[in-house]
Image (cartoon, rainbow, N blue to C red):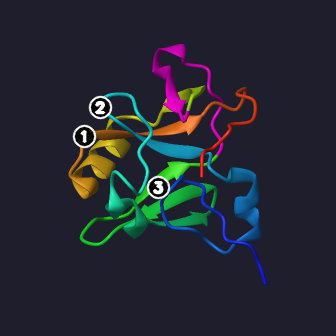
Amino acid sequence: MSALYHPVAHCGGLDDPRAADYERRWLLVNSGGQWMTRTECPALADIAVEMRFGYLVLRAPGMLRIDIPLDVIEDDDSVRSAVLVGTQAVDVVDEGELAAAWVSNFTGIPCRLMKVHPDMGPVDWPE
């Protein structure tokens, strides 16, 4: 039996061993700077996640897919911020306006797709 990985926290999982290195690397953050879970936004469960050709691929009903590069050198401090995951401040990088429009349009909630900064230590994800 293989594991199910969730590169985007609280979105659809995938049965792909390559995804282990990307477990919970991305998260959705609402306009108040709070991490979004399926409790606040049940639509997250409908976002399907794949890994293809160096990209994180997101698909959702009624939406065109969006491809996000898996590994990018994070050297632009203007897109970095901190968000709360539970009680922990997590250093994140904003994936940009196109990704924000995609997740906001699908969920119906103004939000942004954020990536945990590679220099960030372990994140204590609440269950």
Q: Assign the N terminus to one quadrant of the image.
A: bottom right
Q: Which of marks 2 and 3 is in front?
A: 2
Name the amino acid, label 1: Pro
Helix or strand or loop: what does disc 1 sit on?
Answer: loop
Marked residue nearer the N-terminal end (2 or 1):
2
Q: Write the residue at 75% across / 35% down.
A: 122
Mark 3, residue position: 67
Q: In this view, does 21 lie to the left or right of 40?
A: right
First in sequence: mark 2 or mark 3? 2
Classify mark 3: helix, strand or loop: strand
N-term-proximal mark, 3 vs 1: 3
Amino acid type at image mark 3: Asp
Residue 64, magenta (yes or no): no
Residue at mark 2 to residue at mark 1: CA–CA distance: 6 Å
How would you rate the neighbour count of disc 3 (Cα within 10 Å): few for under 14, some for 14-19, many for 20 or more?
Answer: some
Q: Name the residue under label 1.
A: 110
Q: Give the range drawn in magenta.
A: 71-86
Q: Residue 119 lies in what quarter of the image?
A: top right
Q: Residue at x 44, y 61 (%)?
A: 58
User: Any mark on residue 3, and which?
Assistant: none
- Report whether 118 appears left or right of 56: right
Residue tagged 2? 31
Residue at 66%, 64% (x, y): give it: 5
- The image quadrant that residue 85 belongs to is top right
Q: Point out residue 86 in the picture as x, y percentages from the top left corner.
A: 54, 35
